[in-house]
Every structure is written in C-alpha cells, then in structure tokens.
Amino acid sequence: MLRVLIADKLPDAARTALQEAECEVVVNAALKGPALTDALAQVDPDVLVVRSTKVTGADFEAAQRLSLVVRAGAGVNTIDLGTASSRGVYVANCPGKNATAVAELAFAHILNADRRVADGVADLRAGQWKKKTYAKARGLHGRTLGVIGCGTIGREVIALGKAFGMDVVAWSRSLSADQAEAMGCRRAAHAIDVARVADVISVHLALNASTLGFVGESIFEAMRPGAIFVNTSRGDVVDEAALAAAVQVKGIRAGLDVFVGEPSGDGAWQSQLAALPGVYGTHHVGASTDQAQEAVAQAATAIIANYATTGSVTNCVNLAERTPATHLLVVRHRDEVGVLAAILDLLREAAINVEQMENIIFKAGESGRARAACARIQVVGEPPAAVLRLIGDADAVFDAKLVPLT
C-alpha cells in the first residue's frame, strides 16, 4: 500500500480516488517550508503531491521512503530536481490540464488591457462617470496576436485569437512551419520577429536556464508603441525592469498573472512593476478554476494509481534522455529463475556497469512449453569476448549478441 501525502489544496475527490486505489492518504494543505520538511519526516510517504509548494533538497532528505513527487500542474521549477534525481525519486507533472484556464485568463488580460475594464470599474466604485475616457479602445478583430511559446497553453491562446478574428504569428523553439500552418498561424523565425509585428504579445514559456529573463530589452524595444503585453507563464522569464521601462516610455499596457519574487502565501506584498499605471496584475491564479483543478487532480491521481499497480511513472520529467551506455547486450533466454542474475554477475565481475535494462516476456505457446524472454541490457564499455561466450553458452540462453550504440 502506497502512503501519499497531499501537501497542497486539491479537490477532495483526489483523496477519495486515491483511497479507492487502496492508498493510505494524509492531507495537509498548509504544509510549507520547515513544516513540510517535518511532516515528510513524520509521515514518511511514498508519494508527495504538491501544487505551488516548494520541495527542497532538505525535504527529499527528510523522507526516506519518498519515491515519487507529483506536481499537480505543469511547471516543476518549484521542485529541486537535482536532489530528486540524485536520490532516485521520480518527479512527474500534469501538463495541459490547466491549459484552457490559463488561456482564458490570458485573454481576459488582453481584453482588459484594450478596454481598460479594471480602471473603469475602479472609477465607478469611486463615484466617477468617465465615458469619454473609456470609450477609446483599439479593438482586437483584425489585429495581430503574437504568441511566444507554443506548448499546450500557447496553442489554446492561438485558437482563442483566431476565434476573435485576429491574425496570429507565433514563435517557439520546437514550432515547425507545418505545425504553424495546421494551427492557422504564421511562424516567426525568432521571438523578436513576433515583437516587431504584434499588436498583442502573450508569453507562454516554461521557466528553465535558457528562458530566464528571455523576454528582455531587445524584445520590448522591438514592440510597437501602445502594444499589449501579457505574461501568464512565469515571472522570471521576463526582465521586469525592461518591461517597466517599456510601459513608461512606449505606453505598453501589460497584463501580468506572474511576477518575480511573488509570495507563496497571502499577505502584504509590494511590487514597483505592479503599481505602475498601465500594468494590470492578478495573483498567479491562471490555473485556479474549478474545471482546471478537477482535471489536474484527476491527472495526478491517475499517475499515482498507475505507479501503485505497475511501478511506471507517466509524465516523468527527470529521467535521463541519454546515458553513458556504449553497447546494448541482447540476450534471448528461457524465462527461468537465476538467468538474469547470472548474466549480471558476469558483467559485475568484468567491471561492466549496467545503465538501463528491460526483460521482455513472450507469450507461452499452445504446446505449454516454458516461456521465453529477451533481455535488453545497456552497458558502459564493451564486455570481454570471454564474458560474452560464457553468457551465450549458458544452458538457458538461446542467443546473445552485442550491438554498439551510436
């Protein structure tokens, strides 16, 4: 039975579904910082589920049994992936489940920036009627929407832009011309080319080393005066000083759901950028709709249920894409006790390290003969010929061959 600690707010249906999957579930949505570290030491779960809560190296070290962390959302920048990988802990996420919600908020910011809805509401609440002021707007139909980052959320925003009658130009490192054509948009060669032609820019980049501060001075300088800039991805992908200058000098209107250094909990917080006229901020709530949270909770529980029954992890983000393996040892053998152990003993004695392996079982025939299997073992270095002969000559082995990996 897996023990699961849910350390963030999720619909209660997640707890119920995990209990139905015969998991022991502990829920405490208030755990953060040292409190989370202490809880991990006390509960010692097999699985930890979080949303925005940070999971640090100290957290991993506190939980001896922890083998899987599920981020009930898309990004994993709040999780110490290095420590997770060094301890053999899977980290999985739930990409795409909140895409519609985030795209909806992105367009709410676009519409608000164009029509200044928030400013108008504030004046009405203050007892001011300013029809002449707020009757001025450019409108979106026929304008150019620029999308930077074309993952699941970016693609949703592109679809919404098309529905509003906008011409869409997009850039992403992985976006091909064929993909852009299929989505009904133009593909830009670089993000700066998006900035040059767009009336509205919406950013949807994952945060990593290559995107930190990616949207900076050069992009804001390329933007048209009075254009709209929206960021619902991560605050750190934007150079906030450069954005503030663009707001003040070029009249850029910005809709931001994310900020650099935003707090992890409610309370007093000051941001010079958020306080600027022409900047409209929300509280990192893009994914916070009932629909999105239910979809994310279902995805998270599905990952855990599959892990409990098969041992495999869907949407794992910290597995090595490449290993130091130089050769693949393929061994067809009878499915008997001790066959693989003997092969691994021979490799160990030859100081050959195994990087990855799988053992595929064949279906037994109608004759009732014993089942066969095929072991595929990736190793570092070429095993000596004598070792290969010993493996191939074993009674339970049909054939053994070594394939260089390129």
Image (spheres, rainbow, N blue to C red):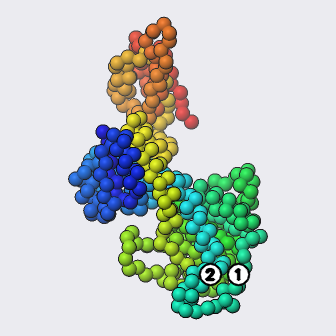
Residue 81: give its label.
none
Q: Residue furthest right?
A: 142
In the image, what residue occupies the spot 41% across and 56% down? 11
Above or below residue 199? Residue 59 is above
Q: Quadrant of the C terminus?
A: top right
Q: Position of residue 334 (x, y in %)?
A: 43, 15
Does 168 sit above or below residue 223? Answer: above
Residue placed farthest to the top in the image? 367
Q: Is residue 242 visible?
A: no
Is residue 370 left or right of 32 when viewed as pictured? right
Q: Amino acid at mark 1?
A: Ala
Numbered label tally? 2
Residue extending farthest bottom: 128
Quadrant of the frame with the N terminus: top left
Q: Answer left or right for 319 relative to 136.
A: left
Residue beneath the point at 60% across and 85% down: 120
Nearer to us in this view, 33 or 125:
125
Q: Position of residue 217 (x, y in %)?
A: 60, 76
Residue found at the far left of this picture: 42
Counting from the top left corner in percent of width and height, residue 244 is at 56, 81
Image marks 2 and 1: residues in contact by CB distance under 8 Å: yes
- Residue 174 vs residue 308, the one in the foreground: 308
Residue 95 in the image, given as x and y percentages of width and height: 52, 53
Q: Residues within 10 Å of mark 2 (few under 14, many from 20)?
A: many
Tell me the residue that label 1 is attached to.
Answer: 137
Which residue carries the number 2 mark? 116
Tell me, yes or no, if residue 323 can be seen here: yes
185 left or right of 344? right
Which amino acid type is shown beneath numbered disc 2? Arg
